[in-house]
Image (cartoon, coloured by chain):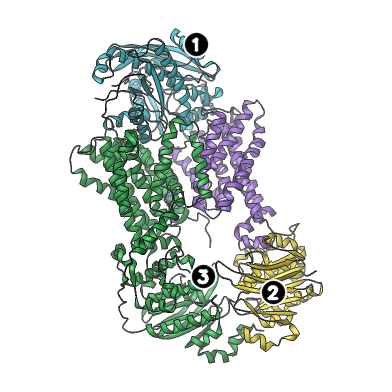
């Protein structure tokens, strides 16, 4: 069995890194790796392509986690060394980078970032707002369609209706005036947004410029700090985001996390977001798992995962089976900042830390 | 000052020397007619004089300046107008625009005299030049070139496809301008036209000069020998 | 030979470079296979496909679906080549459909392939049930018996060498010579009776097959196929690798892929602004080394090859002679009208050329002489009237169809293929009447010769320097070479457009001898456009005078010279 | 009429006019110089960043226009002299070289501004009521400005002496030189003008989209299709091409959805490339 694991993440933008790497690597690798000296962790982060804007945040947060782990004695007594590698390129290139980590750097572990599903949060929002009709807009690919399928079942269970559903092609230059006009005609209470990246920005800006932001609530499932920066203050009225981490989460753990980042990087703190937080959590998750299992053997790691707790930027997460239970936050956009309005505790995510 | 002179000029396309060591000149108020059958290198000589092809040897002087490797647009600035044999007009432009394109104020007033002589041009002012017949294009090109009023004018087969009465008018215009001191180099196959205007002949065959001299010194029969079948 | 060396080198390479490079190169060999196909289209046949990833990707998806449907079955080794073939057939169809249109080559073809590739990306991203949508098809099983990255490396290496060997063969075969000829002068190739569109479509099909083969192996090697493999970005990368490596040579695209691809792979993780370096590198190569990086080596390798070729002299093979034409028939043009942009070039031209002897067509500039030739060979469409050989109507047939009926033509400006050797130039003419389509894959056809060429080579020694490129020839020599090519076809009717233009008096005199010799030897009709009356007098049995797109006079040289209307046209008249 | 239908009609108008504005510069360089400038989108991107700089400095939005003209025109000048001029008549090499250029410009923008999304405040926020429907004011103004610029260019090209000279030079360069027109200098000017128009388009779209180094990629391909459909070298062609491509895109996405619209545009572009490669206004 390969002495490594991939901490999965859901794909975002062009970097389809982790999931793809997970797909290819087992076939490509069969060699055991010597395990002494430093504990090398390959860090898959987007360094090129449009998703590269998340790279510095991921890397910075992972470095902080590595520092913390090392200060606490390292993993199995060995110091962590991070080896960043580009996950922003074409799939085969990413896979190649992973293999390079295995074969050339002889890393013990590869992690990517991961985020969590938040479909339960729909229900809470619905009830809180008393919303009846929903309009769904997403990119035309698996994650958005699955999320929306789930959302639809929650909505109908709660007695709501679907006023419309739209998908725009991923990776094409999209315009949203037509869709916004249809939304305007449909007059929904809530728009559920599963478009990502630049499309997310374009949609929200068009939405607000038609003046719909005053009457219609928007709830986005993958909206983090960088994207909000693009949406801008004037277009972010009545816009909610639901994710596992926001830089503005008021929890003690996050204050500590942010202070530590500040201490480490000073003025050059990268923009904190859920993606960076995931990288931070990934390193801690790895330490906790490997320390508990006593090795990087997959079977031992799998056994160790049950009930495991580890530090994340948002607080402590616990693994149940192969899922991670962690806190989720609903945040309202105030200009270009998130203000957490509700915390859902110990939500089980769909997938995480597969071994 | 001699408007155009050239000595020992050779050149051509690729590895081919179409023109070999030709010399000649034209003084102010004179017409040099270059005569020869198709394909003997007449148009190529003009392209060498005007800078469209590089001279492989020899010197070209325009209005007292050595042309060297000057671009065609620069040579024009020295004072030479050129009416090429092929594609003589801007096909996509109207007849009026063809005439107006290089006129400072864009007005056609300066062409009055030509319109009186060639009323067909005035009738077709609004028409796209590409739709003119070959002869009409030649008239248009001739009109444009002569109206530029430069000290030297180079005409490449100006009468091709033109009706005889208009050819005679072209000759009248050239002779008028000659009297005013303009120098002309005219490549021509129509001997009747050449005889109306020429002061000197340069008769070419296979890229070389086979006969040259003043109009008065060369008999028609000598020229016809080199020209006809 | 070189490919055998390459194979050995590729097979021992893993022992030198270590595991990671072994893995990486295995992937790049697949990319290189696609790039070789791109080089074949762009560097040989002269058209640039911008969507080559599409053929790679389609085959990769097919392969992935097959592998997932029958994991572990050895039957897959039979099916994968079929997946590759599917890409090849698709390319063939696209090529046949696009090249026959008038915008078929150049930027329009490129943009069509680009748009098709974008379309393929969208289909791959949206057709969830088949392609797995945006996330692609994952968990593709390995090929049976190929269970680690080293085995995959060897498979890719062998596949690459197979592609290189196939390509070497095609480049050397008459087909490759025709491709290069098409890139240099498509019109001239058509005048030898080859349909250039079909041969370009074949080139595109071969490149599609190479890309398909790589794609079919990519799926099991990578275990994952996602829409990016059909997309534009990958196509663009292939294009740049090919351009940087050198599109004109077989090994150029391979070198480009391995060099640039691995450079980016190395720098991606380590050098912060590697893309800036790459961008500067591309621009430098394009501006300073248009031949690509391989152009730095070709002077050396070419010299080696030439000395190698000299070492083994190869005998010429006699080309099959053209089947004798039973009866000579006259060429007649009746009331033909040709016009372009509203102006009549030919005005109801009626003329009959005798089935034997030399006819000269004369007339002042713009009389329609060359247009008459273009009408006969099918390059200018007649809006009215007809062109017939005997009773056979050839009006408005495609140039290559007319050429096959036994028309030889020499164009006004010498239009030999400058970047081909003299021998290849002559061989193309021989193939035009003696080779069946499949013969074009036989290397021996490169050595064809014929008695006519042998006799011409006795008169003109330079024709015997078969290996030297036609671009080294002087203008006069090119005229003679083109004349020789037109004669080598052994045409029933030979059309010569100013065969002696630009020749010295001495050269002209020898050329006239050759034309007379050929006319007698072939016993066919020769029609010559000529201005030089001295020449006409020596050569013409009959003279036709054209004026304003119609026949003005016809007769012997003496008749014509005595005809006042003809004289008036030449001296310029007062009519 | 149903206000929603009016809104959709305005959307179509907006889509067509902005696309025409972006394609215009490309049309000029492709149509007149035969240069396939793959870096055209990056000039749009630079224009958008000029708007960002002005916005961040708190200066009036309109200041972005001269800044963009200066930056894009300057870069265009250098590029023409160093990269484009040696490659005229080598269209495939121009393609590769401008691809390299686009990479370079993107990376330079990244070095200067980072990769993150940035937003430029909409200069005329809010909506205006028109024919009984609320439409974003800035978009309305853009429609008007685009039409004005295109009409002005149309008029200028059709009637001015400079336009005449350009037409003359494109149609018959040898004769143009005989008339003393500096063909090389005009080619440089044309390229610079094309770059400036791209920059201007960038300023205009900046308040609508996330401003980031990869902005240009979205525009260049669709602009190429516009040229293909409209035919090369005429302003009328650009207008017609955007009418077909932009109009189809908008109408299809209004009626069916974005994915279908994107498919339709691709298929129509392919059909045009295949069957009518000289565009709608082919003659001769």
Q: Are marks 1 and 3 on the same chain?
A: no
Res C573 seen here: yes
Q: Is residue B146 left or right of residue D257?
A: right
- Asked if labels 3 and 1 touch by Cβ distance under 8 angstroms, the answer is no
> What residue is at 42 percent from the left and 15 percent from the top?
A65
Res A243 seen here: no
- In purple, which chain? D
- Chain letter of mark 3 equals C
- Residue C474's mark? 3
Q: Are marks 2 and 1 on the same chain?
A: no
Q: Reply above or below: C115 against B154.
A: above
- Chain letter of mark 2 equals B
Quarter the C terminus of chain A occupies: top left
| Residue matched to label 2 | B23
Picture colour for chain C = green
Distance of mark 1 from mark 3, alpha carbons? 81 Å
Element type where label 2 sits in the image: strand
Quarter the N terminus of chain A occupies: top left
Comparing C257 with A149, the one in front is: C257
| Residue matched to label 1 | A259
Element type where label 3 sits in the image: loop
- Asked if labels 3 and 2 touch by Cβ distance under 8 angstroms, the answer is no
Q: Reply above or below: C433 against A306.
A: below
Comparing D19 with C289, the one in front is: C289
Q: Reply above or below: D87 against A196.
A: below
- Chain letter of mark 1 equals A
Q: Position of residue B24 (x, y in %)?
A: 71, 74
In the current view of this chain or complex, which residue is farthest to the right?
B180
Picture colour for chain B = yellow
- In cyan, which chain? A
Q: Position of residue B152 (x, y in %)?
A: 75, 68
Crowding at label 1, few (<14), some or many (≥20) Cα neighbours within 10 Å? few
């Amino acid at each position: 069995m390969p002495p490594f694991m991939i901490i999965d993440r859901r794909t975002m933008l062009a970097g389809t890194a982790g999931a793809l790497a997970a797909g290819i690597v087992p076939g490509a690798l069969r060699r055991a790796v010597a395990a002494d000296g430093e504990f090398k962790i390959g860090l898959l982060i987007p360094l090129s392509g449009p998703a590269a804007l998340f790279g510095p945040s991921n890397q910075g947060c992972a470095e902080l986690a590595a520092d913390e782990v090392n200060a606490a004695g390292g993993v199995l007594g060995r110091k962590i060394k991070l080896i960043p590698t580009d996950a922003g390129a074409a799939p085969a290139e990413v896979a190649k980078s992973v293999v390079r980590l295995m074969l050339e750097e002889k890393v013990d572990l590869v992690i990517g970032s991961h985020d969590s599903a938040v479909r339960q949060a729909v229900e809470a929002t619905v009830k809180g707002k008393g919303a009846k009709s929903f309009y769904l807009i997403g990119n035309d690919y698996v994650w958005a369609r699955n999320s929306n399928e789930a959302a639809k079942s929650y909505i109908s269970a709660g007695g709501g209706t679907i006023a419309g559903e739209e998908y725009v092609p991923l990776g094409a230059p999209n315009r949203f005036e037509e869709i916004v006009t249809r939304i305007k005609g449909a007059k929904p209470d809530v728009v559920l947004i599963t478009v990502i990246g630049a499309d997310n920005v374009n949609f929200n800006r068009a939405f607000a410029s038609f003046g719909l932001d005053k009457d219609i609530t928007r709830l986005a499932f993958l909206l983090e700090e960088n994207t909000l920066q693009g949406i801008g203050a004037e277009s972010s009225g009545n816009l909610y985001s639901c994710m596992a981490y926001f830089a503005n989460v008021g929890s003690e753990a996050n204050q500590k996390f942010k202070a530590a980042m500040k201490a480490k990087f000073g003025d050059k703190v990268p923009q904190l977001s859920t993606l960076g937080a995931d990288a931070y959590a990934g390193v801690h998750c790895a330490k906790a798992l490997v320390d508990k299992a006593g090795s990087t053997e997959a079977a031992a790691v799998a056994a160790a995962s049950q009930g495991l707790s580890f530090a994340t930027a948002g607080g402590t997460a616990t693994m149940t089976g192969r899922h991670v239970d962690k806190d989720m936050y609903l945040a309202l956009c105030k200009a270009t900042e998130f203000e957490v309005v509700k915390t859902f505790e110990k939500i089980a995510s769909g997938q995480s830390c597969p071994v | 000052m001699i408007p155009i002179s050239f000595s020992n000029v050779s050149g051509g396309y690729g590895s081919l020397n179409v023109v070999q060591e030709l010399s000649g000149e034209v003084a102010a108020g004179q017409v040099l007619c270059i005569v020869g059958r198709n394909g003997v290198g007449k148009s190529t000589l003009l392209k060498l004089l005007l800078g469209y092809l590089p001279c492989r040897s020899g010197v070209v002087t325009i209005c007292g300046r050595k042309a060297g490797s000057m671009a065609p647009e620069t040579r024009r600035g020295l004072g030479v107008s050129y009416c090429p044999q092929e594609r003589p007009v801007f096909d996509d432009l109207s007849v009026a625009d063809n005439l107006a394109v290089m006129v400072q104020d864009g007005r056609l007033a300066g062409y009055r005299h030509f319109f009186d002589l060639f009323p067909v041009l005035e009738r077709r002012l609004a028409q796209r030049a590409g739709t003119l017949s070959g002869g009409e294009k030649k008239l248009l090109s001739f009109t444009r070139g002569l109206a530029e009023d430069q000290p030297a004018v180079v005409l490449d087969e100006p009468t091709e496809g033109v009706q005889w009465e208009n050819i005679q008018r072209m000759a009248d215009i050239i002779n008028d301008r000659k009297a005013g001191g303009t120098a002309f180099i005219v490549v021509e196959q129509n001997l009747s036209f050449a005889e109306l205007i020429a002061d000197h002949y340069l008769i070419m065959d296979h890229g070389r000069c086979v006969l040259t001299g003043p109009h008065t010194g060369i008999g028609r029969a000598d020229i016809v020998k080199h020209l006809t079948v | 030979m070189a490919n055998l060396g390459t194979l050995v080198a590729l097979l021992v390479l893993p022992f030198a470079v270590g595991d990671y490079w072994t893995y990486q190169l295995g992937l790049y060999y697949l990319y290189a296979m696609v790039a070789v196909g791109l080089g074949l289209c762009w560097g040989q046949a002269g058209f640039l496909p911008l969507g080559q990833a599409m053929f790679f990707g389609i085959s990769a998806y097919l392969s992935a679906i097959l592998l997932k449907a029958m994991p572990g079955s050895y039957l897959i080794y039979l099916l994968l080549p079929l997946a590759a073939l599917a890409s090849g057939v698709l390319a063939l169809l696209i090529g046949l459909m696009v090249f026959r249109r008038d915008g078929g080559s150049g930027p329009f073809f490129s943009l069509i392939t680009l748009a098709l590739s974008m379309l393929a990306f969208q289909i791959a991203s949206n057709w969830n049930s088949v392609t797995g949508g945006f996330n692609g098809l994952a968990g593709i099983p390995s090929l049976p018996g190929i269970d680690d990255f080293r085995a995959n490396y060897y498979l890719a290496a062998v596949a690459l060498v197979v592609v290189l060997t196939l390509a070497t063969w095609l480049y050397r075969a008459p087909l490759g010579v025709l491709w290069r000829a098409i890139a240099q002068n498509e019109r001239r190739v058509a005048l030898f009776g080859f349909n250039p569109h079909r041969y370009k479509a074949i080139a595109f099909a071969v490149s599609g097959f190479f890309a398909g083969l790589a794609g079919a192996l990519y799926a099991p090697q990578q275990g994952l196929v996602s829409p990016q493999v059909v997309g534009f970005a990958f196509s663009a990368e292939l294009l740049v690798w090919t351009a940087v490596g050198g599109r004109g040579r077989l090994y150029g695209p391979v070198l480009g892929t391995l060099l640039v691809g691995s450079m980016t792979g190395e720098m991606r993780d380590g050098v912060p602004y590697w893309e800036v370096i790459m961008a500067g590198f591309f621009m430098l190569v394009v501006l300073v080394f248009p031949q690509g990086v391989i152009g730095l080596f070709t002077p050396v390798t070419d010299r080696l090859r030439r000395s190698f070729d000299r070492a083994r002299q190869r005998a010429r093979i006699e080309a099959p002679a053209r089947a004798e034409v039973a009866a000579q028939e006259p060429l007649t043009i009746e009331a033909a009208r040709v016009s372009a942009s509203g102006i009549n070039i030919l005005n109801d031209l009626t003329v009959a050329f005798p089935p034997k002897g030399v006819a000269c067509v004369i007339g002042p500039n713009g009389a329609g002489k060359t247009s008459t030739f273009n009408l006969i060979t099918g390059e200018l469409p007649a809006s009215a009237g007809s062109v017939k050989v005997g009773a056979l109507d050839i009006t408005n047939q495609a140039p290559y169809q007319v050429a096959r009926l036994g028309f030889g033509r020499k164009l006004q400006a010498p239009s030999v293929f400058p970047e081909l050797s003299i021998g290849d130039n002559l061989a193309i003419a021989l193939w035009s009447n003696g080779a069946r389509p499949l013969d074009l894959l036989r290397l021996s056809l490169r050595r064809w010769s014929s008695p006519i060429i042998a006799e011409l080579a006795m008169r003109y020694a330079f024709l015997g320097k078969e290996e030297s490129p036609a671009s080294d020839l002087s203008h006069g020599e090119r005229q003679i070479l083109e004349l020789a090519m037109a004669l080598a076809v052994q045409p029933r009717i030979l059309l010569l457009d100013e065969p002696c233009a630009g020749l010295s008096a001495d050269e002209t005199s020898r050329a006239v001898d050759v034309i007379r010799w050929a006319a007698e030897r072939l016993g066919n009709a020769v029609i010559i456009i000529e201005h030089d009356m001295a020449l006409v007098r020596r050569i013409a049995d009959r003279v036709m005078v054209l004026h304003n797109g119609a026949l003005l006079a016809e007769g012997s040289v003496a008749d014509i010279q005595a005809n006042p209307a003809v004289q008036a046209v030449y001296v310029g008249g007062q009519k | 009429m149903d206000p929603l239908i009016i809104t959709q009609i305005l959307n179509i108008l907006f889509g067509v006019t902005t696309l025409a504005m972006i394609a215009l510069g490309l049309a000029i360089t492709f149509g007149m110089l035969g240069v396939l400038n793959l870096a055209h989108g990056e000039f749009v991107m630079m224009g958008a960043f000029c708007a960002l700089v002005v916005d961040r400095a708190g200066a009036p939005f309109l200041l972005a226009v001269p800044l963009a003209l200066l930056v894009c025109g300057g870069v265009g000048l250098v590029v023409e002299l160093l990269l484009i001029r040696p490659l005229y008549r080598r269209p495939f090499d121009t393609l590769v070289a401008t691809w390299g250029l686009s990479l370079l410009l993107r990376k330079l923008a990244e070095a200067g501004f980072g990769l993150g999304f940035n937003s430029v405040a909409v200069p005329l926020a809010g909506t205006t009521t028109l024919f009984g429907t609320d439409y974003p004011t800035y978009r309305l103004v853009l429609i008007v400005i685009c039409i004005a610029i295109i009409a002005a260019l149309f008029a200028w090209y059709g009637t001015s002496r400079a336009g005449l000279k350009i037409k003359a030079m494109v149609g018959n360069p040898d004769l143009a030189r005989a008339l003393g027109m500096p063909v090389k200098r005009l080619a440089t000017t044309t390229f610079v003008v094309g770059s400036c128009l791209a920059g201007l388009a960038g300023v205009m779209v900046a308040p609508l989209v996330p401003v980031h180094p990869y902005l240009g990629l979205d525009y260049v391909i669709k602009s190429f299709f516009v040229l293909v459909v409209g035919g090369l070298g005429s302003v009328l062609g650009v207008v017609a091409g955007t009418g077909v491509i932009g109009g189809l895109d908008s109408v299809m996405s209004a009626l069916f959805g974005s994915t279908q619209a994107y498919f339709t545009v691709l298929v129509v572009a392919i059909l045009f490339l295949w069957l009518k490669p000289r565009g709608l206004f082919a003659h001769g």
